[in-house]
Amino acid sequence: MSRPRRRRRGRIGPWALRVLALAVVLAIGVALGQALDDSSAPSGTETSVRTLEPGTQSVPTVTVTVTISTTP
């Protein structure tokens, strides 16, 4: 006595429906994020980055002499 084989009908449909629903939720989330980003007002702060070139230093015009003497 052998059992009749069961067919795997209907297995792809529910998975395809789940994947489609997930894609729709993702698309709605992206669209909502873009809409919120576009409607936000500027924060008012601005960051600026610049590179400063090193300047030249003037040579000191005063010479200081230090004398150290030791006593025996």
Image (cartoon, helix red, strand yellow):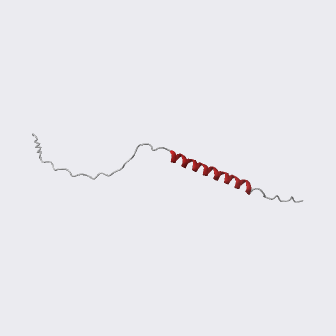
Q: Residue at x 51, y 45 (%)?
A: 39
Which percent across, then down, holds residue 66?
A: 12, 43
Which percent across, then down, holds residue 24?
A: 64, 52
Q: Nearer the viewer, residue 8 or 35?
A: 35
Compared across the picture, whether 55 is left or right of 17 comes to left
Q: Quadrant of residue 13?
A: bottom right
Which percent across, then down, holds residue 37?
A: 51, 47
Which percent across, then down, holds residue 36?
A: 54, 46
Q: Residue at x 65, y 51 (%)?
A: 22
Q: Quadrant of the C terminus?
A: top left
Q: Nearer the viewer, residue 5 or 11?
A: 11
Compared across the picture, whether 36 is left or right of 68 comes to right
Q: Residue at x 70, y 55 (%)?
A: 16
Spot the residue most to the top: 71
Compared across the picture, whether 60 is left or right of 9 comes to left
Q: Where is 58 relative to 4, above or below?
A: above
